[in-house]
Amino acid sequence: MDLATFAVQCLNAVQYGLLLFLVASGLTLIFGIMGVINLAHGSFYMIGAYMAFALSPLFGQNFILMLLCGTLLAAALGYILEWLFFSYLYQREHLQQVLMTWALILVFEELRSLLVGNDVHGVKAPDWLAGSIPLGDLMTYPVYRLFASAACIAIAIALWFVVQRTRLGMMIRAGASNRDMVRGLGIDITRLYRIVFAGGVALAALAGMIAAPMASVYPGMGGHVLIVSFVVVVIGGIGSIGGALVAALLVGFVDTFGKVFFAEYSGIGIYLLMAIILVWRPEGLTKRGA
Amino acid sequence: MATMPPTPLDRLPPWLLPMLAGAALLLAQPLLTPYLQDLVLRIVVLAVFALSLELLIGTTGLVSLGHAAFYGIGAYATVMLSPADGPGSIVLLLPAAAGCAALYALFVGAFSLRTKGVYFIMVTLAFAQMAYFVFHDTKFGGGTDGIYLNFPPVLGDAAKPLLDGGDKPTLYRLAAGVLIATYALLAMLRRSRFGHALAGIRVNEQRMRAAGFPTTLYKLAAFVIGGALAGVAGFLVAVKDGVVNPELLSWHVSGEVMLVIILGGLGHLRGAVIGAVAFVLLKEALSNPALLGRAADHWQLTLGFTVIVFVALLPQGLIGVLQRTRS
Amino acid sequence: MTAVLRCEGLTRRFGGLTAVGDATLDFRLGEVHAVIGTNGAGKSTLINMLSGELPASAGRVLLDGHDITPWPQPKRARAGIGRSYQRTTVFGEFSVFENARLCAQASCPRPFAVWQGAMTCKDSGQAAREALAAAGLTEQAAQRTSTLSHGAKRQLEIAMCLATRPRVLLLDEPLAGMGAEETERMLALLKSLKPGHAIALVEHDMDAVFRIADRITVMVNGQVIASDAPQAIRANREVQVAYLGEQQ
């Protein structure tokens, strides 16, 4: 493999990993703070992608504006969903949460089928992000993919800022490590949960919107992202955003380079990675087992 | 048994009702139309599959979200190990299907039982997805199209078989026999020392360790047995449909079978069977245009809402409803 | 009297915090060896390291002279180290008899003989009946455990420990939440268990400790500050300061 190809694969790995990080960070926060296992999280990614498909003709070249608008819509959806549905799941056993969120996937899939049908769609990147830049003598790299990575990095930094430097972030961190303590401190738990949930949904949907121009928008896209996100959360450790970042990048590299070297069997690569890490750290990279 | 909450039917000997039901199942076969026989066959296969998961979730407390992998592997093993030019032998293929599924369960269990709680749920799902990918993306299992079972397996000589898997009534009786045997096996397991230990692990694993039980070994044994039985269900579905495809290993199937045992009632063997009956009938009803008109096209939506309402209001399942109406 | 169970230099660190530091203690047959100290002194951590639930950061645990430090808890339990818990860990859905029988089953031969019913197992049934009789619970054997009084549940906790026929009993606050009459019953039981058992007793009830213990170890902030006969402990200046200081 020459240097240019290697560079391209590295960039692809990072870009995929960063997108996964957006989805997984929401999942790990929702689980870490509210203790809810949410199978429908992948559906929010799908909703984001379909939103991009629906909004793109309206916004035209104002791509960033569309992303912002979509994020706000998704956050609103998340806020309402938490209020109407998820808040009733917190006290229930994992098994019931699994079933109810699984049923929610069915509902989302059918609603999508009713509203926009089951066709596969494409979303065009805006002109100012189209095209490629040269990498070395022979290879080029799509501008949009660089934009995607940059956008994810910007969001990751913003997320870091909120979690580490704001009062909301302090409550989130406290909640992730000790839910009962946060309740005992008199913080408005209901509001906090609602905000965290809305944020998680927004992150997943945003990832879907950013991903839409790069891959097709199709009905089953939520399912695959969901399971890979679970792998990221297991590897990184529940509740840890930093762990999710490291794990997402690891998964990105294993998956991307796996496709290069192992072709059709590459799909199992990330699960073998998970298996190996479980032998060493059964609760993820960031937690030491007793 | 000391581990189950008492139901009103406990005044009768525990084996009486299941035995009567099993006898009724076998005797009913000549009286049913081909459509109904096929429906019952679908229920029976799902019931065997659900019973195998009940051992894991209801008895041992292992919430596995990747059980479809063992079901699918059993099905694929049946097809892939069948000879290309004539019918295979049931005596060889059924245990082989169970064995292949059990092997994968051993692999998955060895890694996933290192984790607990929600990690375990996610890890079992992930390993099932791994198996799904092998059959979906690679040429190993014929890819997305799947493979056909050209000759259904038989018992005995190929020219004059004792049991012909291709004959629908015979398959019905074979499947019913497998269901009865599976139910009896699990009932025996649950009342044995092994079964009592599994129940103890479900209630308080730490206490069991403190008493001296090597709990991981017990959980692994349960996981492998559950996997093997799921493989048996896979054998049945492969013979029934004559074709296998990767969707048998999908997480939709894993979720459905989990729903079935909750629907019937967790912690009871008959819950798995009742759930299978209810689920197949429910699916039939929801997708029947004569009953629901246009809504039948979007039966998944109705199913989704039904599940949400059901789990929210009746977490004890249909058996719970029975208990409450009697008391 | 030789030590059945012994720990040498047993230490447990959690990050920067030393929960138990360099504990060297003996537990002998026929003796009640009480471990006392204020909250957070490391008593439960010590018991957890002896039972095998918590790995030690440093030091050794010896059973009859053999180094069992790397042994996991189930192995230690089968070798004769039983324990009871501070929080009641009985199996609520099962009967009182089944609770004891299940614990006794751990040492039954042929655990995977699935064709045999559990309730007909002679070994575990016998051990369970003996344990329940010792704990005074024979009359309630058929009752569902969740319906027992708190004191009866604590007795069952001990019975479950006894059902495994251990030589060493690690008892973590068996008197917790008990009234006067129940405490008397429990102390009489512990006294009757002394011959043939080495008993490690973590307790807060000082009257009970001084009545029943043959030796007392005092822990403060993870360190053993004294380990001696009860009278010597009572007269020990350091112990008085540690306790009186806390009480004021």
Image (cartoon, coloured by chain):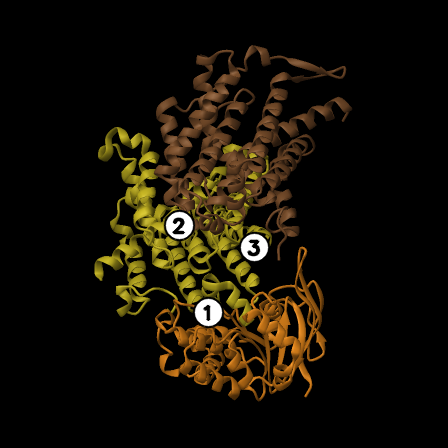
Chain colours: A brown, B yellow, C orange
**Which chain hosts label 3?**
B
- Out of B40 and C147, give the one closest to the viewer: C147
Q: Residue B311 carries which label?
A: none
Q: Which amino acid does label 2 sit on?
A: Arg
Q: Position of residue A226 (x, y in %)?
A: 51, 36
Q: Is residue B320 above or below residue A251?
A: below
C-alpha span from label 1 to label 2: 23 Å
Front in this rendered view, residue B213 or C225: C225
Identify the element where label 3 is drawn. loop
Label 1 marks which chain's residue? C
Side of A63 relative to B322 (left or right) = right
Q: Which residue is drawn at 55% across and 64% down?
A: B215
Residue type beneath disc 3: Leu
Chain of the residue that carries numbered disc 2 in the rendered image:
A
Say what secondary structure mark 1 lies in: loop
Q: Distance between the residues labelled 2 and 3?
A: 23 Å
Question: What is the number of the mark on residue A92?
Answer: 2
- Are labels 3 and 1 assigned to the same chain? no
Amino acid tagged 1: Thr
Q: Kindly indicate whether the residues beneath marks 2 and 3 are on one polypeptide chain.
A: no
Q: Quadrant of the C terminus of chain A?
A: bottom right
Can you say whether C52 is above or below C207 in the image? above
Which picture quadrant has residue A98? top left
Q: Quadrant of the N terminus of chain A?
A: top right
Q: Which residue is drawn at 61% across and 76% down?
A: C240
Q: Position of residue B174 (x, y in %)?
A: 39, 53
Residue indicated by mark 3: B113
For the point 57% across and 45% down, the residue is A234
Residue behind mark 1:
C88
Q: Which of B314 and B265 is in front in this view?
A: B314
